[in-house]
Image: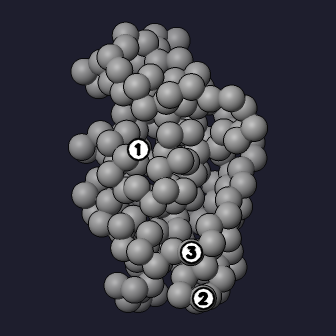
Amino acid sequence: MYLSVYTKAILAGLALSLCLVGPVSAKASLPNFTAQATQQTQKITETQIRNILEQMRVATKNKNAETITNFMSPNVAIEITVQAASGSQTLRLKRQEYRQYLEQGFQMMQNYNGSYSNLKVQVSPDGKTATAAFNVNEEVSFQGQKIRSTSAETIRFELIQGKILATSVKAVSRIQ
C-alpha cells in the first residue's frame, strides 16, 4: 500500500499520538511529572512510568512534539503497523522522524479525543527496565475528516545514564 506524505503525516500523527496518549486517569490529583520523570534515578518504579505516560499525554493534548520526544532515547526504535481498509503498512521510525511526523500531524489535527484501557506496567526485578502495555481508542479530525482508531500499544523503558527513557515503541493501529 502506497502512502502519500499527507497520509503518512496523518497516520503517523494519529498513531504516534496513540502510542503516547499516556493511559493515566485524568481524575487523579497529579504532581509535577516533568521534574520527577526526568530527574536522575537509580531504579525504575511503576509510579515513574505512569508519571512519564501522563506527561506524554499532556504533551500530546498540547501538541508538543519536543516534550514527547524528550522522553525517548536518541536510539529509540518505533514500529507502527497501521491497518486500514486499503491494506496494511508498517512504519519504522527514528526519534527525529517521529518528531517530524508528530509536528506535521499536530498541525493538521483537530478535536482529539482518546481513551485507554488495560494498562499494565511491568518493572524488571533490578529496576533497570520497564514495559507499559495498553489499548487506546481515539477519534481525531484532520481538515474536517473524522478518523477513528483502535490500537494495542507497548512501550519499553530503560534506565540510561540515570534517566528513564523509552527505547522501543510498538503499536498496531486499526483505522476505521
Q: Callout 3: helix, strand or loop?
A: strand
- 116 is higher (above) or lower (below) than 81: above
As drawn, the label of residue 144 is 2
Marks 3 and 1 sit apart, C-alpha to C-alpha, by: 27 Å
Residue depicted at 63% across the width and 54% down the height: 152
Q: Nearer the viewer, mark 3 or mark 1?
A: 3
Disc 2, SS: loop
Q: Is residue 157 visible?
A: yes
Residue marked by disc 1: 168
Q: Of the residues tagged 2 and 1, which is closer to the observer? A: 2
Residue nearest the observer in this picture, 139 or 81: 139
Quarter placement of the C terminus: bottom right
Instruction: Relative to 115, say whether 142 is above or below.
Output: below
| Crowd rating for badge 2 (residues with CA inside 10 Å; few <14, some 14–19, many 20+) | few
Pinpoint residue 111: horizontal percent, then vertical percent.
63, 72
- Between residues 35 and 134, which one lies in front from this camera angle? 35
Q: Residue at x 30, y 66 (%)?
A: 100
Tell me how far mark 3 sits from mark 2, CA to CA. Answer: 8 Å
Q: Residues within 10 Å of mark 3 (few under 14, many from 20)?
A: some
Residue labelled with disc 3: 110
Is residue 159 or residue 22 the one in the foreground?
22
